[in-house]
Image (cartoon, rainbow, N blue to C red):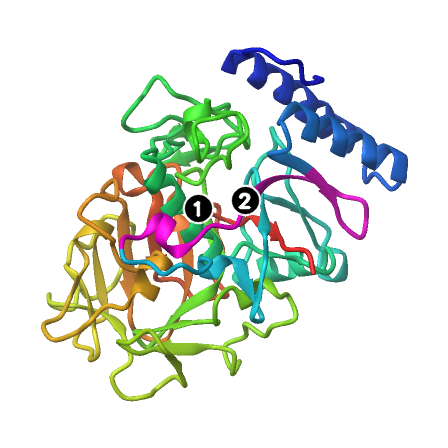
Amino acid sequence: MRYVSGPYTQGQLLKEINEIEMSLTNRFTFGGPITDAAEQRSWRERVEDASFGRNTVLFDDQGNPSVMVVVPAFLEKDVLTGGLNKPHPAFIVNGVVKPYIYVSKYQSFYTGSGTTLRAITLKGKDPGVNITFDNALLACKQKGAGWHLMTNAEWAAIALLCKSRGFMPRGNNNYGKDHSVTTEKGIPAHWYDDSGTKYIGRVLTGSGPVGWSSDGSPFGIYDLNGNVWEWVGGLRLNNGEIQVLQDNNAADNTKDQSASSTEWKAILQDGSLVAPGTTDTLKYDSTGADSGVFADVGDIRLSTTITNSLTTSYASNTFETTQANGGVTVPNLLKLLGLYPIDASHGADGLYMRNTGERIALRGGNWSSGSIAGVFCLYLNYVRSFSNVTLGFRSAYIPA
C-alpha cells in the first residue's frame, strides 16, 4: 500500500496490514525461515509501507521473521507528573540512551529446543506456553545480539504510555472475549476441559479487534491484556524485596538474570539502587494475615503495601489501591517501572505477590483473569522453573 495523500479509514488500514502479515505467517508456516536477503527486504518494506513505518519485520540468526512495533523514546515527564526531563528507564541500556525499542507486536511462540530454541512473533499463531522463565530468556537471547525477553521496564513504559493517551487496551480475559465488551472476540487457538466442560482458552495472536492493541490502532502492540500471562525480564521479588536490573539493562542479553546474579539490585526510598539485603530497602508486604496455601488468581484478597519490613507471605489487591506503609516514601522509580500506582485509576488491574523465596514477574493476565487483567496487572507468585498452559512470553529488540 503505497502512501497517497488523503484520508484512510481504519478498516482500510487494518485490511491491508492484516493481509500482508497473514501472508508472511503462511510463508513461514509452509516455507520455514527466510534467509534470502532480497526476500527479507521485501517483507520488511511491505510491512513498513502499510504501517507508515510504525511496524517492521526483523529476522533472527536463523532467518525466522518477527513482526515488531517501533516504540520511540519518551521522557519521564511525558507519562508521570513530577517526572524528570530525562528518558524513561526503558530507553537506557548500559548507560546509553536508545532512540527507540522494538517490541513484538504479538505474543511469541517458539521453535526448537536447547541450542536451537528460538522465539518467533507472527500474526494468527497459537502463543507459546509451557515455558519456564529461563527458557523464555534463552529463546529470545539465542536469536542474536539485541534480542531479549521483553523486560518489565519496557512493559511499564508501554503501560504508562497507554494511560497517558487515555486508552487502556482490552483483550481475551473472559474465555475468548473481553469481560467488559463481550462482543469483542478472538479466534480460538486452544480449548481446555474443566471437569467435562470445555472452555475457550488461548486465542490466535492478533485475532481480536483493534481495541485489543496498545493504542486502539492496527499498528499497536496486541494482547497485553489477557490471553496468556507473559514472563518479563529484569524484575523479581526475593523474600519480598523488590529487585531489578538497573534501567533497562535486562535488554542486554549478556546480562546475568540467574538466581545468584550480582546484577540484581534492591531499591531505597530515594530511588537509588543498592545491594540486596541493605537496610530499609523497599518490599511488597500485606497488612492482612497469612493466607496459607495459595491456589488460583482471585482467591486472595489482601491489601498489598510497599514497606521496608515483612509480616506475611501472600497478598493481592487492585494495582491502583496499593499503598505505602506509614513513613515509607515511594520513589518515582517504582511508578516508572509499573510497580506502584501513579493515581487512583489503573483499570482495576490486579497485583499479586508472594514474599517468600524468589518470585519472577508475570504481566497482563490470562484468558480467565476477568477484570484483574490489563497492562498494569502484575503477578509475583511463581518461581522461575514453573510452567503451564497459561504462561507465555514476548520478545523485544534493541539495536546496539
**With 260 as the anchor, is 297 left or right in this view?**
left
Residue depicted at x 21% and y 43% = 345
Q: Is residue 171 magenta?
A: no
Amino acid on which disc 2 is placed: Val
| Cα distance between the residues tagged 2 and 1 | 9 Å
Residue 158 has which mark? 1
- The front one of 12 and 391 is 12
Secondary structure type for disc 1: helix
User: Which callout, 2 or 1, points at the residue further toward the start of the chain?
Assistant: 2
Residue 196 drawn above or below residue 362: above
**Which quarter of the image is occupied by the C terminus?**
bottom right
How many discs appear? 2
Pointer 2: what residue? 71
Q: Residue 134 falls in which quadrant of the image? A: bottom right
**Labels 2, 1: front one:** 2
Q: Residue 147 falls in which quadrant of the image? A: bottom right
Residue depicted at x 40% and y 44% = 161
* Region in magenta: 57-81
* Dot 1 alpha-carbon crowd within 10 angstroms: few under 14, some 14 to 19, many 20 or more: many
Residue 375 drawn above or below residue 272: above
Secondary structure type for disc 2: strand
Amino acid on which disc 1 is placed: Ile
**Which quarter of the image is occupied by the N terminus?**
top right
Residue depicted at x 76% and y 49% = 60
Q: Position of residue 212 (x, y in %)?
A: 43, 30
Q: Are marks 2 and 1 in contact (CB under 8 Å)?
A: yes
